Amino acid sequence: MSADVRRPSLPGPEASADAVLLARLRAGDDAAFAELVRAAGPRLLATLRRMLRREEDARDALQETFLAAWRHLDRFEEQSLLSTWLHRIAVNVALMRLRSLRRRPEASIDELLPRFEDDGHRVLEPPAPARALEEELDEAARRAAVRRCVDRLPEPHRTVLVLRDLEELGTEEAARALGITPDAAKMRLHRARQALRTLLEREGALGRTPPAGEAGSRERAAS
């Protein structure tokens, strides 16, 4: 393919609206920038809250995201939607902030990983306290429990979990964002999911653990 051949524009009305908005932005239309902030701001702020946790940090990162986008509009090649481009900028801003805010040594995750007996059976968590049926069926309560447990993970494991499972980045893209290899990202994600399951079990958010001695109360370790 020759160097002057451009990739085809994204189809659909959303792409057409993007093109109009982008032209206004590049022309210096302040109203267009205000529209962009109103349209993309809430979703970006939700992403930044998941990654940074502190409201003040998330809002500062949101401003930094839009400032970076404004400065680098000329680099946007229209091969994705504006919202996708902004999301990538927000994730990078959050990761840079996490690296600069990292002060303490990384906390160990080992206590939250599965343990196995000498015969290869998994040691299960003690049964969680009984919960009311209404609470077990409350999806909002379940989501809140997941958020609490994700926030309790050590930062490197929480970040890869957020990028892969909540922000839905691919393994290679998440690895590049974190500055690690794809294999390291996969291992970190695997350990993060195991630890999250342990925390959810302790909160009773995954249902009750069968009493010892009942069928299925112990799991054979995967080979």
Image (tube, grey):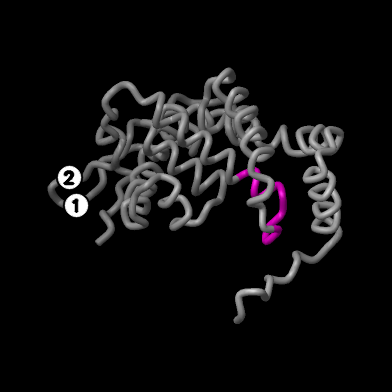
Q: Name the foreground residue: 71 vs 195.
A: 71
Q: Name the foreground residue: 208 vs 142.
A: 142
* Residue at point 41%, 24% (across, down): 101
Secondary structure of the residue carrying numbered label 2: loop
* Residue at point 33%, 21% (across, down): 103
Asked if marks 1 and 2 touch (Cβ < 8 Å), the reply is yes
Measured Cα–Cα span from mark 1 to mark 2: 5 Å
Label number found at residue 120? 1
Q: Hey, which residue is sitting farthest bottom in the picture? A: 1
Q: Position of residue 147 (x, y in %)?
A: 53, 31
Report which residue position mark 2 lands on.
117
Q: Position of residue 54 (x, y in %)?
A: 53, 20
Secondary structure of the residue carrying numbered label 1: loop
Q: Main secondary structure of the magenta part?
A: helix
Question: How many residues crowd around disc 2 within 10 Å: few (fewer than 14), some, or many (20 or more)?
Answer: few
**The N terminus lies in quadrant:** bottom right
Q: Compared with residue 141, is residue 3 higher up or lower down, i.e. above or below? A: below
Type of the residue with mark 1? Gly
Q: Is residue 146 magenta?
A: no
Is residue 215 shown to the viewer in this render?
Answer: no
Side of 70 relative to 151 (left or right) = right
Q: Position of residue 195 (x, y in %)?
A: 36, 38
Is residue 188 shown to the viewer in this render?
Answer: yes
- Residue 13, image quadrant: bottom right
Question: How many residues crowd around disc 1 within 10 Å: few (fewer than 14), some, or many (20 or more)?
Answer: some
Q: Is residue 85 magenta?
A: yes
* Magenta segment boundaries in residue numbering: 78-87
